Image: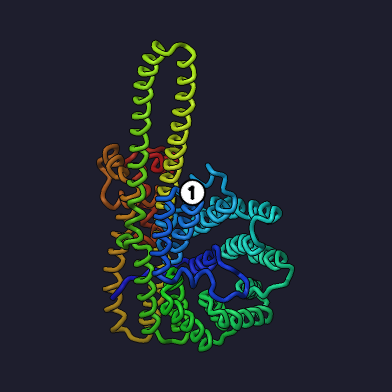
Amino acid sequence: MFSFVFLNKNYGQKNDSILKYELDISDKKSSYSEIYSDSKSYKEFSDSYNLAVKNKDTLSMISFRIKLSNFDRFRGNYDMAFDKLWEALVIAEEKKMQPQLLLIYRGLGILYDLYNKDELALENLEKALSLGKQLLLAKEIKKNEVASCYFNIAGFWRARKEYKKALVYLDSCVSVHKKSKILPYVMTDRGYCNLQLGNLGEAEKLLFEAKHHLEEIEATYLVTNLSFIGDLKKEQYKYNDALHYYQESLNILEKKVLHLELKPDLLQKIAEIYTIKGDLLAAVNHMKASKISYEKLFGTNSRQNQRLFEIKNKYLTEITESNKLIDLQKAVIVENDKKVFRILIIFGFVIIGVIALYLFYYQRNRIKKLSLISSLDKEKNKAVLRIKSKELTAHALQMIEKEEALHDLLQIVKKSDLASFKSLEHKYAKGSDKSWEEFNKRFTEVNVNFYESLCKIHPDLSATELKHCALIKLNFNSHEMSKVLNISVQSVHTSRYRIRKKIGLNKSESLQTYIGSI
């Protein structure tokens, strides 16, 4: 009847951790997220940015570019947010705008975290923290900026289940303010870490105290808080209470139309509760809704994902245009040299030297600037391509989780309703084929010439063997391949043997190394 995706168990945790950006983590009302939930604000920011460009106000240009990036990120337009921060980074580094660089590094860390680029995410978050400490000593920023940096890094470690590390950074948030402020966001995360460490009493105290303060200031971080309380109630085997808090969290999310990246995870948690309660129909419906929500945000055919695919071509085009501009500047230099030569004859050697020196430094600085922009564009393009490869592997792993979860559900249905089981099993087989087509489409978009190159070298490989080669290239083991292709592990071993035989590899040569080199 359907085919759905089980989200990665860290998905919700990771997206909870990125909700903080320039957000005031204290107890102030009218928080950052509320400002960025208003569509009117986006137009005002855009108009202000255009005015700054017109007036050549660099500081305002950078500030509004960062705000527009924040707005895009809160609405789930991560590619557009990433794009704006990179543009701001070039100018801010050139002009040495330290407070703005802090915000940019933190924003890039959050976006890299979204795409599981752990090293880059942590590097940028730590750069933001280090810069923040320096600026705080110089009294150029407020304490809350440094506390926000600590909070972001705490969220990074929490998402990776390093709860003790996360608590150290959360304690630093409190220390920055010298325990003089109520920090409901920090309370929420401390409560969750204590929950995961088995300290249920402390977790309940912190989460409900934070809930009280978040409700008072009407903060959208209440969505995360309620989800964590639902996790607490589930851990206490109070499934009705858990369902209540998950649903309340989902209602606020849908009402605010903000942080939509959390919706698939919330729907999945609700489905799991319904499964425990034995309401399989409700569980299936919520899992389907979770899949639809996930695909809307991150699926191949979504507007968000289409823009991600377009970034590659966009920056290749920009690199080409930059190279053309450099060539044009070189041509201008040649022409100017000829003019300078004529002037030298007329005005003498002294005037010639002054003009030549001026042109030399002027053109050299312009070329340096263009070269810097071109280099950053290339780096950005490579980062996007690496992200797409990571997404492809994550998608395949989600297919495996989906197949295992759906198989378990079908076995439960089989015991209670054999007739429905046969119907669902037939439609499940069709869904598996569709899942492979979706995976193969993504694979060919990232590895454009793989099949063509492989068939050219080994034209006798069958279509099924080509599928196996694609999964081998992604470093999948036999068990994972059997789940994706819906066959036995023994069949995978047999196919690998046939592929080795057709390719002509001996026992000492690695099939995976050979396929990976193509």
Mark 1 = which residue? 58
* Residue at 56% from the left image edge and 48% from the top image edge: 97
- Residue lying furthest front: 347
Q: Is residue 413 visible?
A: yes
Q: Can you say whether 284 is above or below 132 in the image? A: below
Quarter occupied by residue 77: bottom left
User: Left or right: 134 with respect to 262?
Assistant: right
Q: Position of residue 482 (x, y in %)?
A: 39, 60
User: Left or right: 466 with respect to 233?
Assistant: left
User: In front: 415, or 316?
Assistant: 316
Q: Residues within 10 Å of mark 1 (few under 14, many from 20)?
A: some
* Residue at 61% from the left image edge and 51% from the top image edge: 127
Q: Can you say whether 127 is above or below 184 in the image? A: above
* Residue at 36% from the left image edge and 57% from the top image edge: 491
Q: Position of residue 407 (x, y in %)?
A: 38, 72
| Quadrant placement of the C terminus | top left
Quarter occupied by residue 154: bottom right
**Could you tell me the amino acid type at mark 1?**
Thr
Quarter occupied by residue 440: bottom left
Q: Can you say whether 105 is above or below 171 in the image? A: above
Q: Position of residue 490 (x, y in %)?
A: 39, 57
User: Left or right: 114 with respect to 332?
Assistant: right
- Residue lying furthest bottom: 240
Q: Is residue 476 visible?
A: no
Task: Describe the element under mark 1 as helix, strand or loop.
Answer: helix
Q: Can you say whether 180 is above or below 157 in the image? A: below
Q: Position of residue 186 (x, y in %)?
A: 63, 71
* Residue at 39% from the left image edge and 16% from the top image edge: 343
